[in-house]
Image (cartoon, coloured by chain):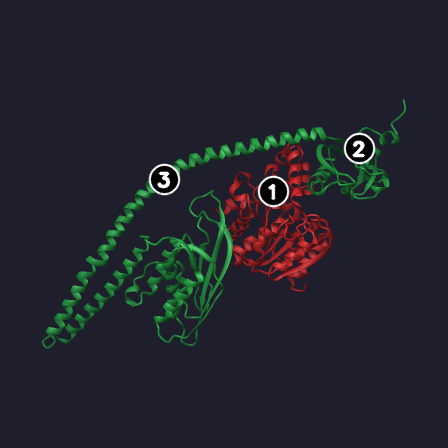
Amino acid sequence: MKSSILSRNNVKISGEGAQTMMFAHGFGCDQNMWRFITPAFQKDYQLVLFDYVGAGKSDITAYVDSRYNNLNGYADDVLEICEALALKDIIFVGHSVSSMIGLLAAVRRPEIFSKLIFIGPSARYINDDLGYIGGFERKDIEGLLDTMDKNYVGWANFLAPAIMKNPERPELGQELTESFCSTDPKIARKFAEVTFLSDNREDLNRLKVPSLIMQCSDDLIAPMEVGDYLLDHIPMSTLKVMKATGHCPHMSCPEETIDIIKSYLRNNL
Amino acid sequence: MSEMGIDDLDFAPCGYLSFRDDGVISVINQTLIEWLGYSDKDELRGKSVETIFPIAGRIFYQTHFYPLLKLHEKAEEIFFTLKGKDKQELPVICNARRKMAKDIVLNHCIFVPAVLRGKYEQELLTARRVAEDALSKNNELVATKVRLEKHSFDLDRRLGELKQMNEDLVQFGKVVSHDLQEPIRKIALFADKIALENNAILAKATLEQLRKINRECFQLRQLASNLERFISLNLQSELKGKVDLNQILKTALSKAKETLSGIDLGFMTDPLPEIYGYANQLEMLFFQIISNSIHFRDDNRVLEIRVTQSLYKQNVYRQMDGYYKYVEFIKITISDNGKGIGNKKGKDLFTIQKKAAVNSLGLTFGLAFCKKVVDNHHGVIFIDPGETIGTVINISLPVEHS
């Protein structure tokens, strides 16, 4: 059971510390996205990286629609890895949609988590009629899913072979993981739907573990209002607005990202 | 033959623009300017290329298009929707290429309108979604049918087995409650009678032995009646319904307090939700736990009982692999500052214990009752192993009827 979960989620363990930091990638990516961040924590923590089922080098055959058609199924991935490794008191770092996945996991099993760190989180992406601002209108999201669908054929043909098999061109595989994270296109499309249509606002005040919200300036996917909303609704949360722009500060501004995480962990933020 | 100049490109029958890696538009042709409804190139030159995409297009550009272009140095036949000056939308097909020019990389893109093509695509897409939907429903249906047949078969067998077990239990219960109780009662009675009538002639030791017979009989009867209660929990006569846990807890508390008159205790509880369950059983569950707290209190301090709750979502399937349905669960934690009931034993505490006979209140029997009630609600009960002070009991129950 243990080894099957570790291979299912392509779990990689490294680092020299006693306490565990777990890094969870976001939509359309895999664990490679953390490569600029993890070296900074190598000495002081045990690092656990993984790919969600359907992403990266995970076991795609483990994808079950009824499990992964909502974020709770992804939270099960996180908890099953923690159980397989008997992890306790971990620091969970989640990017984008992984923030809410981590939150759902910690709401269910608070004793496993000591701190949560959210990078570019959002509890709901779509604005509602009652004044909630998520940054998107429903038609924007439909447009995105539409665009993904329209490019699906080319996308699948184009990317899939490059990801799956390229023994004669290893440098391509290398480059691919570095410049774009690999995901099965069909699952990516489904994950996009699950992510962008999710609404976890009612789960926020159930969190009993301290958390850090890292809000980027000028983030298309999670605008400033979303960060403020999370701060208001998650007990024991801290908000840090970053200088970094865009949705992927751990790729574009790793230094600032590392500094903020480190000062939060030293309790002086 | 003259080479194509920038003027020709300006009026070429396709939209053209190039942008730098920081996203800034460097060149844009007249055709594209007109299609997008701008009057001057300077309205776009120097701006971010994302200006001409609606939000969906911007996400697609950031997460898919640009990384792809960067990786392969080209992208072909990408469907995009562009956004004009007045927010009008223009579906296009885009080909792009990266090229080093002097010391800077430029990303060159041409756009061909795909309004008609787009409509056709849309129709195809709609048709594909319908077909996929139908197919997946059909596949699901076929698979479900196969599973259903298998389950029906299994279910039928199990129902048969359960029915048999239930009948056995009914018989067993009857034996325990009547047939077994009566001889025990008689043995006790006769022992009593012998002792009473022959008090003068019997040796002291013999009288003591008769008293022991009597005591053992009493305990045996207690055990029998506890067993009967335990078994009766299997025979569900009560109907499930909405249960207000606050009310249940209140009643259980006052009943538990009655077991020890004059008991002084502090009680704090979170507000609890309504759940779907057996009201009487749940009341007994809380009664047992609170009675245990009272019984195993530490006389050095006033007993404090604290009830907290948290809600979370979890897969409701516990026995079958590969089935998922996430529903709301409540975890109720009841902690006290008493002596703590053998935390090291963990699971064993929830089984029927011999000690029950010795204890007139049947307290340790109580935990076996608790587990039974929780099982009947498809939940889980466990004791926190790590606690040093008092006892911490956790109960997880599904909130709604699934």
The quarter holding residue B342 reads: bottom left
Per the image, the residue denoted by label 3 is B154
| Residue B10 left/right relative to B161 | right
Q: Which residue is painted at 85% across and 30% down in the image? A: B11
Tag 3's secondary structure?
A: helix
Q: Is residue A262 left or right of residue B370?
A: right
The chain painted green is: B
Query: Chain A takes which shade in the image?
Result: red
The residue at the point 23 percent across, 58 percent down is: B177
Q: Disc 1 marks which amino acid?
A: Glu
Q: Position of residue B251 (x, y in %)?
A: 39, 65
| Label 3 with label 1: CB-CB less than 8 Å | no
- Give the residue type that dot 2 points to: Gly
- What distance separates the C-alpha of mark 2 from that of mark 3? 65 Å
The lab-note entry on whether marks 3 and 1 share a chain reads: no
Q: Nearer the viewer, mark 2 or mark 3?
A: 2
From the image, tell me which residue sits under label 2.
B15
Q: Specify the label residue A193 is tagged with.
A: 1
Q: Quadrant of residue B198?
A: bottom left
Q: Nearer the viewer, residue A145 or B108?
A: A145
Q: Mark 2 and mark 3, same subunit?
A: yes
Circle 3 chain: B
Q: Nearer the viewer, residue B173 or B85?
A: B85
- The quadrant of the picture occupied by the N terminus of chain B is top right
Q: Is residue B353 left or right of residue A129?
A: left
Mark 2 and mark 1: Cα distance apart in space: 31 Å
Q: What number of labels is visible? A: 3
Q: Chain of mark 1?
A: A
Badge 2 element: strand
Q: Position of residue A40 (x, y in %)?
A: 67, 55
